[in-house]
Each structure stands twice: as structure tokens, then as C-alpha cells.
């Protein structure tokens, strides 16, 4: 095959792969990465991933089988990216008033790794299409078709990578809270002991509470995960703000489990006291893949969740 | 503060108005105060300085602890 056709395939693959990575490099409420150095780091890794994907097809066609070794090396580098992202976020987490928690951080770092694979695969599809079609068609036609194939692959892969939200697996509604002596309860679920009357007054004035009622046993098991609950309080605090400073432990947002129903009761002192915004923030919290459980996937799980004597929702605690 | 606190939880101080509670071997500094208001003020200052929470027991003691 002429060099110009390989060059066209590699260039098109490189461009589409890099653009696909750039398109996924967006800052949201998590504000990460939200600084130029972060963008440059991730774009450069995306460029390298796209280059490897774009070069691999022409290399294999020229019987340069060492290209496979380079792909393996790339996979190792991307795993290293995940580890570095995780280490970096763990370090930053110690300085958060409401930390993300290890499960959330694990999910974020996996996404960064996966996006590099997406750039590589997009470039590979584009490059392969241009290379194959370039043998039968004119390059002026093969290149646009290769670009379209790459875009299609990027769209499909990015859609496959979209995770579910908490609102997809449970009902999120406002909840009542009250004090019984110094103990704070959200609809019968014990939250914490607040010893100072002034703090109790502030909590009653500024606090908000919500209940998350799981739709099925899988959602119930997932919401019980401590990492998932930490992600809920972190996202709520990140979006609504938090009415606390260092050392004011009694104002820490909490998500506790109602044992009888499996519902999660969340309490927070937000800067912006808006119940609708809180419910929306909770519904949009990602369902962490490391926290997801599916007990009914086993025979024992199906048997356990068929038992008729399970307490009804809202039943009084013993 | 994490939802998943470390196993080591420490009582940093106990603030009370009741001298009868000032027994030897309490295991934590016990601060005797003269009034309810002073008790709350002392517990607040301690909790802010030590980055701890204030818990109230049924007998009226305020416990400053890392939770």
C-alpha cells in the first residue's frame, strides 16, 4: 500500500481519537479536572492513545507484529493513569470538609482510564476503515467514511460508558427530622447525638432531610454500601454548599440506614436551603459501579428475597 | 468526617456540673463547671479546638469525643 494511504489513515485516526478524548474532557460540578495542567495531562494521554490506535492497523498490515506489544504497553500506561488519578484524589480528599470517599474516587479514576481506551479504539476504528476502504475507493471518499466510522464508534462507546444515577433505582423524597433529647432522628432513623442546645437550634432552623427508598433488593444492597452513601452526602454538599467549618462535627451531613425498610435517611445543613435542589442533587448522584450489588443473581439471593415475612416499608421498628 | 470512621474513637473530655461524677480513673479529663451555661460554653470551646463532637448523656454530662 502506498505510504500516502497509511499517512491518511494514521492522521485521520489520530485526529478523531484525540477529538473524541477532548469531547469527553468536560468539567462538571465535581470541578475535576478544572485547571489548565489537568487538561494538558489528559489531552496528551488521549493523543498518545489515539496515535497507538491509529498506527496499529497499518503496522499489522505491514507485518509489524510488535504493534501488539505497543498496545499492551499502552494498556499498562493507562492503568498507571488510573492509579495516579486515584492517589491524587485520595490526597485531595483529606482536605475536603465532606470527602468523596474511596469508592467514589475509584469510580472517577476508572473513568479516566476508560476514556483513554475509548480514544485508542476510536482511532483504531477510523484508521482501519480508511485503510480497508482506501484499497477500493479514492482516498477523498475513504477518509470521510473513516472519520464517520470513528465518530460512530466514539458515540457508541461513550454511551456504553454512561452509568446509572441514584434516582434510577430509588425514590427520593423529602423527610421529616426531629430531636428526641439530644438525639437527632430522621423519620425514626437515629442520626447522631448533638450535645449543644445552640447547635440543635441551628440544625432545626437550617437543616434538610431526605429519604431514599430503594426500588428492589439490588438497590437496597447498593444503597447500604458506605461508599455509595458517602458519595450521596459529598455530592449534596458539593452542590448545595455546606453550613459548617473545620471542627464543627455536629454539622457534618450524614446518610444512615433505616434497618426495617433499607431506606437511606440523609441529613444535611446546606448553605442554600432548597429541598427541590437537594432532591435533584441526590437523584443525579452517580450509582457507583464498585458499590453496585445484585443479590438476586444467585439462587440463595432469590430465595432470600422471596421470603414473605420481610417487614413492609414504613413498619415500626421492634 | 468520613461516614466510615476509624475504629479508634476517643473521648477527649467530659464536662459536668456534678462533682459526684469526678471519680478517679475516669479515663478522660473531667472538667467541673458551675452552671449549665458554663458547661455548654466549655464544651463548645473544647470541641472547636479539638475538632470533636459534643455528645450529651442522659445524666447531663457533655462528652467531647472524636466520632
Image: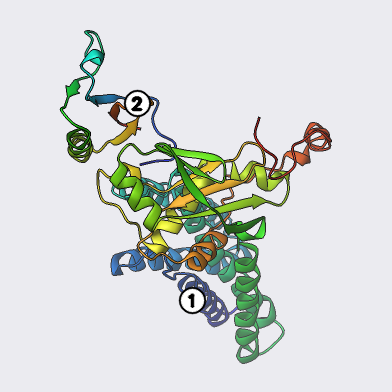
Report x, y in % for residue B45: 17, 39
Query: Which mark is nearer the camera, 1 or 2?
Result: 2
Nearest the viewer among A171 and A168 is A171
Q: Is residue A305 left or right of residue A230?
A: right
Q: Report the residue marked by disc 1.
A: A19
Report x, y in % for residue A175: 55, 54
Q: How is the image coloured?
A: rainbow
Nearest the viewer among A22 and A218 is A218
Q: What's the chain of the residue with tag 2?
A: B
Q: Is residue B65 left or right of residue A116?
A: left
Residue A106 in view:
no
Q: Report the residue marked by disc 2.
A: B9
Report x, y in % for residue A223: 60, 46
Q: Which mark is residue A5?
A: none
3D distance between C-alphas at marks 1 and 2: 50 Å
Q: Most extreme residue toward the top, as rendered?
A: B24
Q: How many marks?
A: 2
Report x, y in % for residue B59: 35, 23
Label 2 CA crowd tier, 10 Å (few <14, some 14–19, many 20+): few
Q: Residue at x 30, y 52 (%)?
A: A244
Residue A258 in view:
yes
Vertical position of residue A142 compared to residue A263: above or below: below
Q: Residue at x 45, y 73 (%)?
A: A22
The C terminus of chain A lies in quadrant? top right
The local secondary structure at tag 1 comes to helix
The N terminus of chain A lies in quadrant? bottom right
Determine which quarter of the picture holds residue B37: top left
Q: Is residue A95 left or right of residue A252?
A: left
Q: What's the chain of the residue with tag 1?
A: A
Amino acid at each position: 500500500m502506498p505510504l500516502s494511504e497509511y499517512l491518511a489513515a494514521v492522521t485521520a485516526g489520530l485526529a478523531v481519537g484525540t477529538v473524541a478524548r477532548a469531547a469527553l474532557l468536560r468539567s462538571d460540578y465535581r470541578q475535576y479536572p478544572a485547571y489548565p495542567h489537568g487538561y494538558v495531562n489528559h489531552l496528551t494521554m488521549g493523543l498518545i492513545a489515539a496515535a497507538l490506535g491509529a498506527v496499529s492497523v497499518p503496522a499489522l498490515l505491514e507485518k509489524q507484529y510488535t504493534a501488539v506489544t505497543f498496545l499492551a504497553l499502552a494498556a499498562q500506561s493507562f492503568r498507571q493513569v488510573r492509579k495516579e488519578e486515584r492517589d491524587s484524589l485520595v490526597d485531595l480528599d483529606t482536605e475536603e470538609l465532606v470527602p468523596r470517599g474511596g469508592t467514589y474516587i475509584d469510580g472517577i479514576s476508572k473513568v479516566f482510564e476508560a476514556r483513554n481506551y475509548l480514544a485508542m479504539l476510536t482511532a483504531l476504528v477510523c484508521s482501519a476503515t480508511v485503510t480497508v476502504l482506501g484499497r477500493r475507493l479514492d482516498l477523498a471518499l475513504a477518509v470521510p467514511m473513516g472519520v464517520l466510522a470513528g465518530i460512530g464508534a466514539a458515540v457508541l462507546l461513550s454511551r456504553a460508558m454512561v452509568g446509572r444515577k441514584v434516582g434510577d433505582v430509588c425514590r427520593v423524597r423529602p423527610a421529616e427530622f426531629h430531636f428526641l433529647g439530644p438525639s437527632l432522628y430522621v423519620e425514626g432513623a437515629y442520626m447522631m447525638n448533638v450535645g449543644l442546645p445552640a447547635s440543635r437550634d441551628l440544625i432545626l432552623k437550617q437543616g434538610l432531610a431526605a429519604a431514599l427508598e430503594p426500588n428492589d433488593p439490588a438497590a437496597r444492597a447498593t444503597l447500604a454500601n458506605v461508599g455509595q452513601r458517602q458519595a450521596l452526602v459529598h455530592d449534596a454538599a458539593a452542590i448545595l454548599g455546606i453550613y459548617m467549618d473545620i471542627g464543627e462535627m455536629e454539622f457534618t451531613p450524614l446518610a444512615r440506614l433505616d434497618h426495617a425498610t433499607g431506606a437511606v435517611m440523609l441529613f444535611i445543613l446546606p448553605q442554600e436551603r432548597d429541598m427541590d435542589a437537594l432532591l435533584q442533587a441526590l437523584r443525579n448522584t452517580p450509582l457507583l459501579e464498585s458499590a453496585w450489588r445484585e443479590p438476586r443473581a444467585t439462587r440463595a439471593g432469590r430465595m432470600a428475597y422471596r421470603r414473605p415475612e420481610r417487614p413492609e416499608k414504613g413498619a415500626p421498628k421492634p | 468526617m468520613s461516614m466510615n470512621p476509624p475504629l479508634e474513637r476517643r473521648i477527649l473530655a467530659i464536662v459536668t456540673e456534678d462533682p459526684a461524677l469526678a471519680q478517679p480513673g475516669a479515663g478522660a479529663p473531667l472538667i467541673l463547671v458551675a452552671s449549665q451555661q458554663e458547661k455548654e460554653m466549655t464544651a463548645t470551646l473544647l470541641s472547636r479546638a479539638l475538632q470533636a463532637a459534643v455528645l450529651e448523656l442522659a445524666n447531663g454530662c457533655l462528652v467531647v469525643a472524636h466520632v
